[in-house]
Image (spheres, rainbow, N blue to C red):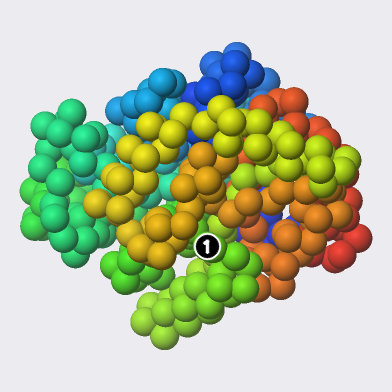
Amino acid sequence: MKPILDPATGFKIGLFSANCTGGLAVTKIPERWSASYEDNVALAKLSDELGIDFLLPIARWIGYGGDTNFHGGVLDPVVLAAAQLAVTERLTVFSTIHTAFNHPLVAAKELATLDQIGPGRAGLNVVAGWNKPEYEAMGVELPTDHDRRYAMAQEWFEIVSRIWSEPGSFDHEGEFYSLKGVEGDPKPMDGKVPILNAGSSPQGMDYAGHNASFLFTIVADSASGGDKVKEIADLARERYGREVGAFTPCHVVCRPTHEEAEQFLDYYANENADWAAVDNLMELQGLHAQSFTPEMLATFRERFAAGHGTLPLIGTPDEVAQSLIELAGSGFGGCTVSFVDYLGELPYFVEEVVPRLESAGIRTPR
């Protein structure tokens, strides 16, 4: 059983997007996250030591412009996972892989190798694709309808799953791939790895229900998030006979007083926001992705500056913990968190917030 899938540990906590310059904060402040290799390895070691459950990087090839070219500097998640798994003992490390840009035979081999490096601790975050400039950079056409993107992603995943589960070799003749003599060895230690899939569209929800261990979904608040948790759980059970949980991404500013937290939020996400990059990011999300509803995009500009549109957890340890307790009460199995300075802010979060989650009974002490 993979550590991240063990329900006995309770509400899961992961770190999101630390392989990207700025993390999730679209800010111009000089102390914004560097996303250097050295900092990411140090963060993996610290997360392992402090009991964080998993790391979730993203895959990006084109930045969002503005003064900082937000997410213009990104460490490859597969290569980085190898380094992070090699220096940790408990941490699960996901690799984000875009099905449109990565051949399934290559991806299957990469994930199986990672699962050997960190025995049983590799994970896969499957992305069907949405960012048109990246498609253009790759010389690949972005399908205009979600159905075709997810049809390709489904065939991709079925090939990967066969490589991981079947001995010997096989041929595959499908709509998107025509393969002969496919084989793969070694295989993941348990024959599979935990699967994340981000999606809010009907196609994305169906894909997660069919394939994923957890749906990774954006929510406006914990109350409305409960509807999404129920939707994916019901869909997976009724349509595919599977149990699928849900995670949601959050950005955190936790300080001893609420005023200190609000002041820092205003400093990095208002006074020093990279608004040109924010607007570019939001425009692309509105044109080609369905992670955010039109209503969210119309009102979330400041939230995008603060944390890429993810759920804000701003305030004292009591306030941040209460928000996480509410997420757990809505049915979420866990969340990711991001910080302006992951290395500097993570210890305070673990020291002050996590014990409150344990006292509330939603997370088991390690």
Looking at the image, which residue is at 30% across and 28% down?
Answer: 62
Q: Nearer the viewer, residue 13 or 281?
A: 281
The image position of residue 336, as x and y in percent, is 61, 48
Looking at the image, which residue is at 63% across and 51% down?
Answer: 312
Q: Does residue 94 sit above or below 61 in this rendering?
A: below
The image position of residue 183, as x and y in percent, is 25, 42
The image position of residue 70, as x and y in percent, is 42, 27
Q: Residue furthest right?
A: 359
Q: Does residue 304 sit above or below 175 in this rendering?
A: above
Say whether residue 298 is visible.
yes
Q: Which residue is tagged 1? A: 219
Q: Nearer the viewer, residue 311 or 13?
A: 311
Q: Residue furthest front?
A: 271
Q: Nearer the viewer, residue 254 or 328?
A: 254
Residue 217 is left or right of residue 171, and the answer is right
Q: Quarter holding the N terminus?
A: bottom right
Callout 1: 10 Å neighbours few (<14), some, many (20+)? Answer: many
Residue 206 is left or right of residue 32, and the answer is left
For residue 269, which quarter of the picture?
Answer: top right
Looking at the image, which residue is at 62% across and 45% down?
Answer: 251
Number of marks drawn: 1
Q: Does residue 225 sit above or below 303 in this rendering?
A: below
Q: Nearer the viewer, residue 220 or 226?
A: 220
Residue 119 is left or right of residue 146, and the answer is right
Find numbered disc 1 in the image and state the secondary structure of the residue it sits on.
loop
Please name the amino acid that badge 1 sits on: Val
The image position of residue 115, as x and y in percent, is 51, 38
Looking at the image, which residue is at 41% across and 65% down?
Answer: 295
Say whether residue 50 is visible.
no
Q: Does residue 28 sit above or below 212 in this rendering?
A: above
